[in-house]
């Protein structure tokens, strides 16, 4: 393992030479407490599986270690792939850099606003309709509703969800929720987008539109952080790869090297 880390550090110097770090993590650790008296609760098992973390016990409080002493720098304009099996720590990483989770220890410095697409968490309240979510998002970005109707027309046409926009989010399929969230996030220009799967969810027509929209976004030199099990998708949009395992980054380097490393360590 040491051989790989030394090799990657040498390569990262040449890549980052003319770029400014926008997100800096140092010894970042995230522990999620399990508030239960039972040692073998369903909640504990689910959290452990989804975060990829190990169970730790401090002062009789059990926690899942979702991120384990991560140190890395993400640079302006980079296109970064998050690679790893389900529960390796990729989603926890995105939630941390976007401010959803607060670190237990270590530090994080963000010089850009990170807009995450994580399952339905961006929309938050499933009792709301898609229209309500679109309106709330527009207000958050613009501080007014000026131009909202044009925005709404775009959301309806791009997402393809039609009249479902006026139904509660709890009635949406996973694909519909993903299409709505992606449409909301990519209408405006952002300094950094963080996508956790989702883009490949739905029909092929939307998938092609989403890829084209990402191409347009990347021409503005925005940062992209993409978590996906699709190698083709990662190769199309990303240049750097972070391989996660049990809440740690075990490889950081060029995408092809990262994918090769992941395949070798999982076969």
Image (tube, rainbow, N blue to C red):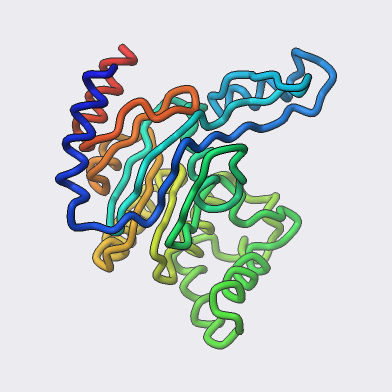
Considering depth in this image, is 182 or 173 the residue closer to the camera?
182
Examine the rendered structure and indicate whether residue 240 appears above or below residue 121.
above
Give x and y (percent) for residue 147.
Answer: 52, 86
Q: Is residue 42 visible?
A: yes
Residue 265, quarter of the rendered image = top left
Q: Is residue 202 visible?
A: no
Give x and y (percent) for residue 125.
Answer: 71, 55
Residue 145, quarter of the rendered image = bottom right
Examine the rendered structure and indicate whether residue 5 appears above or below residue 177.
above
- The N terminus lies in which quarter of the figure? top left
Residue drawn at x 51%, y 68% is 156
**How many numbered discs sit on the rendered protein?**
0
* Direction bottom: furthest residue: 146
Residue drawn at x 51%, y 45% is 107
Examine the rendered structure and indicate whether residue 65 appears above or below residue 16.
above
Residue 235, quarter of the rendered image = top left
Give x and y (percent) for residue 219.
Answer: 24, 65
- The C terminus lies in which quarter of the figure? top left
Residue drawn at x 34%, y 35% is 242
Give x and y (percent) for residue 79.
Answer: 29, 50
Considering depth in this image, is 200 or 93 the residue closer to the camera?
93
* Direction right: furthest residue: 37
Considering depth in this image, is 59 or 205 the residue closer to the camera?
59
């Amino acid at each position: 393992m040491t051989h790989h880390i030394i090799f990657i550090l040498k390569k990262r110097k040449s890549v980052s030479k003319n770029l400014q770090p926008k997100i800096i993590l140092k010894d970042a650790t995230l522990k999620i407490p399990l508030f239960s008296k039972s040692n073998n609760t369903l909640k504990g098992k689910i959290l452990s599986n989804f975060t990829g973390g190990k169970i730790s016990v401090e002062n009789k409080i059990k926690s899942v270690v979702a991120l384990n002493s991560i140190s890395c720098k993400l640079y302006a304009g980079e296109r970064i792939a998050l690679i790893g099996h389900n529960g390796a720590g990729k989603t926890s990483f995105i939630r941390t850099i976007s401010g959803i989770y607060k670190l237990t220890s270590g530090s994080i410095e963000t010089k850009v606003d990170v807009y995450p697409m994580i399952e339905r968490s961006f929309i938050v309240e499933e009792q709301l309709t898609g229209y309500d979510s679109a309106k709330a998002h527009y207000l958050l970005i613009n501080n007014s509703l000026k131009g909202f109707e044009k925005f709404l027309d775009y959301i309806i046409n791009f997402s393809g969800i039609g009249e479902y926009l006026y139904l509660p989010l709890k009635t949406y399929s996973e694909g519909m929720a993903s299409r709505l969230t992606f449409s909301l996030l990519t209408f405006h220009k952002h300094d950094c987008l963080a996508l956790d799967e989702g883009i490949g969810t739905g029909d092929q027509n939307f998938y092609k539109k989403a890829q084209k929209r990402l191409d347009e976004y990347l021409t503005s030199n925005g940062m992209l952080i993409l978590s996906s099990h699709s190698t083709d998708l990662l190769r199309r949009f990303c240049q750097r790869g972070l391989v996660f395992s049990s809440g740690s980054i075990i490889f950081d380097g060029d995408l092809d090297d990262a994918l090769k490393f992941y395949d070798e360590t999982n076969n």
